[in-house]
């Protein structure tokens, strides 16, 4: 009996050792509620690179940079759906030309009890390819890939990070395309991973005389402008709603930002019928 007990304890010890060495095996397939578990204030930076060419068009190479900040969240238990509001700065660089845009995006994810296996049905039999166990601070990952003679494609999910990578390539009938979009930085509460790739667009006025530093600030920032005429300082969100209005006397003003939620803001100074604007980032 003692021998059987020792054997049983040894088996348990070996099982726990295997689980500790491979944390993914304890939860092989993530459910979508775990994947899309974002909170207000979470920030994500993505980089995208694509190449395309064909016998009918010239070769093109495009790089993109996306900065997303979660600024709103609601959940419907009845519909098993979560809704998010995202503020985004998007930069596209193609053939040396830079295009910047800022926008607010509403997204939703539903059927949160589904697993990545169910979503990716058809990708190599929906068997995840586990790699880089230390990436993303040890967060569990599922990645899937598939392909045929024309090319291949794939995507990866991580707990609390959504889709962290998508990629694909195609070559056929004289066409060739390659595409990859990867998460390069995230901030969730006090947790940070990766390298910030902040895009601050030259919008709404690339010739603005306003300077803001530090940007992003912690609790306050300094605004410097040209001219000494009394002005009105207006801070608006991406949708054009005024969130702060103050007097601006002189050339330097300290602005408290502690009341501003994470996101992208437009800071404007108005003197008579003339205005200057600049971008303020709150993290």
Image (cartoon, helix red, strand yellow):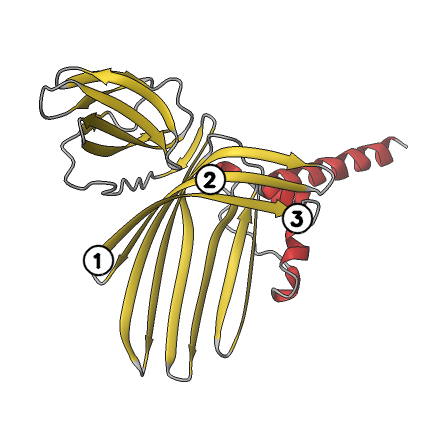
Between 41 and 237, the one nearer to me in the picture: 237
Q: Is residue 247 left or right of residue 102?
A: left
Q: Secondary structure at mark 3?
A: loop
- Which x, y percent locates residue 94? 26, 60
Badge 2: how crowded within 10 Å, few (<14), some, or many (20+)?
many
Check disc 3 and report the residue beneath it: 28
Q: Earlier in the sequence, mark 3 or mark 1?
A: 3
Check disc 2 and report the residue beneath it: 86
Distance in Å between CA atoms under marks 2 and 3 = 29 Å
Q: Secondary structure at mark 1?
A: strand
Q: Is residue 7 left or right of residue 151?
A: right
Q: Earlier in the sequence, mark 2 or mark 3?
A: 3
Q: Say which residue appears at 55% left-offset and 49% top-offset.
A: 157
Q: Nearer the viewer, mark 3 or mark 1?
A: 1
Between 222 and 233, the one nearer to me in the picture: 233
User: Looking at the rendered structure, which numbered label has been put on residue 79?
Assistant: none
- Which x, y percent locates residue 266? 30, 32
Q: Say which residue appears at 69% left-offset and 49% top-offset.
A: 114
Between 35 and 82, the one nearer to me in the picture: 82
Tag 3 near tag 1, CB within 8 Å: no
Residue ranking furthest to the left: 227
Check disc 1 and report the residue beneath it: 97
Tag 2 near tag 1, CB within 8 Å: no
Badge 3: how crowded within 10 Å, few (<14), some, or many (20+)?
some
């Amino acid at each position: 009996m003692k021998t059987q007990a020792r054997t049983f304890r040894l088996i348990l010890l070996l099982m726990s050792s295997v689980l500790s060495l491979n944390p993914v095996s304890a939860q092989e397939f993530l459910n979508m509620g775990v994947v899309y578990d974002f909170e207000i204030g979470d920030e994500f930076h993505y980089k995208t690179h694509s190449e395309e060419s064909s016998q009918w068009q010239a070769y093109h190479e495009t790089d993109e940079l996306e900065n997303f900040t979660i600024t709103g969240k609601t959940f419907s238990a009845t519909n098993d759906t979560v809704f998010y509001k995202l503020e985004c700065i998007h930069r596209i660089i193609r053939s040396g030309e830079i295009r910047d845009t800022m926008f607010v995006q509403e997204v939703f994810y539903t059927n949160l009890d589904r697993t990545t296996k169910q979503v990716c049905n058809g990708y190599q039999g929906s068997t995840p390819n586990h790699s880089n166990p230390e990436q993303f601070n040890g967060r569990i990952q599922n990645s899937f890939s598939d392909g045929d003679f024309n090319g291949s494609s794939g995507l990866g999910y991580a707990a609390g990070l959504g889709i962290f990578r998508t990629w694909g390539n195609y070559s056929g009938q004289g066409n060739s395309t390659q595409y990859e979009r990867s998460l390069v930085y995230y901030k969730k509460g006090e947790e940070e991973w990766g390298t910030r790739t902040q895009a601050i667009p030259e919008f709404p006025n690339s010739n603005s005389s306003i300077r803001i530093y530090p940007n992003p600030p912690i609790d306050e920032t300094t605004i410097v402008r040209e001219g000494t005429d009394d002005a009105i300082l207006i801070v608006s969100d991406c949708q054009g709603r005024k969130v702060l209005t103050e007097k601006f006397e002189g050339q330097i003003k300290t602005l408290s930002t502690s009341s501003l939620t994470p996101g992208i803001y437009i800071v404007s100074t108005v003197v008579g019928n003339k205005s200057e604007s600049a971008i303020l980032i709150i993290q």
